[in-house]
């Protein structure tokens, strides 16, 4: 499904990362992938994973560093010239504030969280626009805490709301060039970022019990839905937030309280 398509994946930290689940699935479908990892510390885990999917472009890209994205564009321009897709599976918030009351969020954490978790998508879209092919696809990851209050999700919910709205605005801006922008709103997953939310285990158990399918989504299922959104199979789909959460988001009231 992705033969002759080349693109970048941001957000692999280890083999539990959603970005890894997506990479495996799209690599299986012949996509050529450049992996952008946050820092040297993660490279130890990312390098062996890159070998599993025959990805030989590994680029350090920390969104805290203002030159990182331009540097990545320059490397990719030289290696490939153009690209077909971007997967943005990155989020960050101070862990101490993913706990307790949202009202206690600090200004510094607010700005940093929105910058890394939300503005980075807009920044990537703008920087890669000149080298993105017609029919290109940009995909980001969100969570239901953008719409409804989930205990301890706090500032990250606000960042995801801004991210989902960015998806809509970006999809119109880039729609002129036939580049699509979508988000997957994934159910809770056992990842490093997922574990940063206080009582993540409770959220996991609650959604498992109360989702329409009575379970949580698996990594490969997020990967398969991402494959659809990245590929031409979804050529008329843009500006969407697509739930891959075993139907948890449609529940108004749990069956057993
Ligand atoms: P993860 O910890 O595996 O991935 C998060 C990634 O963000 C890491 O690779 C990390 O290096 C990267 N990152 C953080 N700060 C960065 C920075 N300054 N520059 C560059 N990269 C940076 O966790 P994950 O759960 O796979 O998270 C991926 C995405 O999926 C996130 O947007 C997350 O909010 C979203 N998501 C997660 C869940 C869940 O329950 N785990 C559910 C829905 C959506």
Image (tube, rainbow, N blue to C red):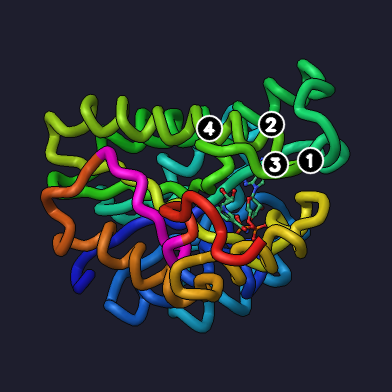
Residue 235 left/right relative to 40: left
Disc 1 target residue: 98
- Tell me, yes or no, whether the two marked residues, 1 and 2, touch with CB atoms within 8 Å: yes
- Tell me, yes or no, whether the two marked residues, 3 and 1, touch with CB atoms within 8 Å: yes
Quarter holding residue 31: bottom left
Give the spatial CA distance, label 3 vs label 1: 6 Å
Disc 4 target residue: 118
Q: Is residue 41 above or below residue 140?
A: below
- Quadrant for the N terminus in the image: bottom left
Give the residue drawn at x 34%, y 37%: 128
10 Å crowding of disc 2: few (<14), some (14-19), many (20+): many
- Tell me, yes or no, whether the two marked residues, 1 and 4, touch with CB atoms within 8 Å: no
Disc 2 target residue: 155
- Tell me, yes or no, whether the two marked residues, 3 and 2, touch with CB atoms within 8 Å: no
Quarter holding residue 215: bottom right
Read off the magenta span: 239-247
Residue 77 visible, this angle: no
Give the residue drawn at x 51%, y 62%: 19
The residue mark sitting in front, 4 or 2, is 2
**x and y percent of residue 80 in the render?**
30, 55
- Tell me, yes or no, whether the two marked residues, 4 and 2, touch with CB atoms within 8 Å: no
Give the spatial CA distance, label 1 vs label 2: 7 Å
- Tell me, yes or no, whether the two marked residues, 3 and 4, touch with CB atoms within 8 Å: no
The residue mark sitting in front, 3 or 4, is 3
Residue 201 vs residue 126, the one in the foreground:
201
Disc 3 target residue: 153
**x and y percent of residue 138 in the render?**
33, 46
Whichever of labels 3 and 4 marks the residue nearer the N terminus, that label is: 4
Give the spatial CA distance, label 3 vs label 4: 15 Å
Whichever of labels 1 and 2 marks the residue nearer the N terminus, that label is: 1
């Amino acid at each position: 499904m992705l033969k002759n398509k080349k693109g970048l994946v941001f957000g692999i930290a280890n083999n539990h990362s959603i970005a890894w689940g997506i990479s495996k699935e799209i690599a299986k479908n012949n996509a050529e992938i450049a992996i952008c990892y946050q820092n040297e510390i993660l490279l130890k885990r990312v390098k062996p994973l890159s070998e599993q999917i025959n990805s030989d472009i590994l680029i350090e890209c920390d969104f805290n560093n203002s030159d990182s994205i331009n540097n990545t564009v320059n490397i990719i321009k030289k290696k490939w010239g153009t690209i077909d897709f971007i997967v943005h599976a990155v989020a960050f918030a101070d862990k101490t504030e993913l706990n307790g009351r949202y009202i206690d969020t600090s200004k510094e954490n607010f700005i940093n969280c929105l910058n890394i978790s939300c503005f980075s998508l807009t920044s990537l879209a703008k920087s890669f626009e000149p080298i993105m092919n017609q029919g290109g696809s940009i995909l980001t990851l969100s969570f239901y805490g953008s719409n409804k209050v989930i205990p301890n999700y706090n500032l990250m919910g606000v960042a995801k709301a801004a991210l989902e709205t960015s998806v809509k605005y970006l999809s119109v801006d880039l729609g002129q060039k036939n580049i699509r922008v979508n988000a997957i709103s994934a159910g809770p997953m056992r990842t490093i970022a997922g574990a940063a939310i206080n009582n993540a285990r409770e959220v996991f158990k609650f959604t498992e019990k109360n989702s329409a399918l009575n379970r949580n989504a698996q990594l490969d299922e997020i990967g398969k839905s991402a494959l659809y959104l990245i590929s031409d199979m979804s050529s008329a789909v843009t500006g969407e937030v697509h739930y891959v959460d075993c139907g948890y988001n449609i529940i108004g009231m749990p069956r057993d309280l």
